[in-house]
Image: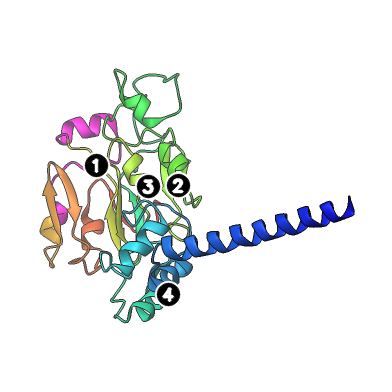
Amino acid sequence: MATGIIYATVLVGVIGVLIGLLLGFAGIKLAVPVDEKEIAVRELLPGNNCGGCGYAGCDALAKAIAAGEAAVNACPVGGAPVADKIGQVMGVDSGEAVKMAAYVKCAGTCDKAGVKANYYGITDCKRATAIPGRGDKACSFGCLGLGSCVAACQFDAIHIQNGVAVVDQEKCVACGKCASECPNGLIELIPYDSKYAVSCSNRDKGPKVMAVCDTGCIGCGICANQCESDAITVQDNVAHIDQSKCTGCGKCAAKCPKKVILAHGLSQ
C-alpha cells in the first residue's frame, strides 16, 4: 500500500513537471513581442484614461506614442512635465506644450438671463434640448445649467453656479470631455494664460439678444474696431477672439457696451 502511494505521488510530480515545462515552452513560443518603449511610456502616463488625448485610454496612447503615431506631449493631463519625460524615452524633443483650459462662453446667470418657462425633467442638458423650448432660459444659445458637463468631468473642475457652468482653471486639465457633452457648444479650450475671452454664444441679432439676456453680445463690432492687433472678429453676430493674436491690452473689454468680454478667469 505504501509503495503504491509513493508511485502515485512520484507520477503526479512528474506529470506536474512535464506540464510546467510544456506551458513554459508554449509561453516562450507564443509570446507577443512587447515594445519596451511602450511599457516605459505607459508608466509615465497618469492613468486617468480620460480620452482627452483622442485615444481610448492611456494604454492606447502609450502604444501610439511608441509607434510614432502620436506626439510625446499628447497627454493633456500630464502636461509639460510628463511630455519631457516621455520625450527622453523616445529620444525626441517634447516641444512647447501650451497649457489649455476649458472656457464657458456664457455669462447668462439667473439674474441676467430671462426665463421663459419652468423646466421639470431629467437634469441632463442633452435631454432638455430634445424637447420643445430647450430648457427654461429665454436664450436658446446659453448654458442650460443642468450639469451634463459636470457629470462628464473626472477632475471636479466644473460646477453649476447661479445657473451657469463655471470652470475651475486650476483643476482643469483640458481633456475636453465637458466640451463634447455640451449640446449648445458653449465650452471651448483656450490657452490657460489667455487675457480676455468672450462670454456669449448667442448668434441672434442685437435686438433679439437684448430681449433675452442683459449680458449678451449684440455683434456691434466696437471691440473689433478697438483691437489694434486684429485679434477680434464678429462672426454670426458674435465676437470671437483669436488668442494667438491677442496682446491683452484690454481695449476691447473697456469699450464693449454689453460687458461680455471679460478678463479670463473672472467669470469662470
Q: Earlier in the sequence, mark 1 or mark 4?
A: 4
Q: How many marks?
A: 4
Q: Is residue 77 left or right of residue 72?
A: right
Q: Earlier in the sequence, mark 2 or mark 4?
A: 4
Q: Which mark is residue 201?
A: 1
Queried whether the magenta region covers residue 243, the answer comes back as: no
Residues at marks 3 and 2 touching, judged by CB atoms closer than 8 Å = yes
Q: Is residue 197 left or right of residue 48?
A: left
**Residue at image mark 4:** 81
Q: Is residue 238 above or below residue 85?
A: above
Looking at the rendered structure, the secondary structure element under dot 2 is loop
Local packing at callout 4 (Cα closer than 10 Å; few below 14, some 14-19, many 20+) is few
Residues at marks 2 and 4 touching, judged by CB atoms closer than 8 Å = no
Looking at this view, name the residue that lies furthest to the right: 2
Q: What is the spatial separation of the Cα atoms under label 1 and label 4, in whole angstroms?
A: 34 Å
Residue stretch rendered in magenta on the structure: 204-223
Q: Earlier in the sequence, mark 4 or mark 3?
A: 4
Q: Earlier in the sequence, mark 3 or mark 2?
A: 2
In the image shown, does 70 or 172 lie closer to the viewer? 70
Residue at screen point 43% across, 64% down: 29
Residue at screen point 13% across, 56% down: 224
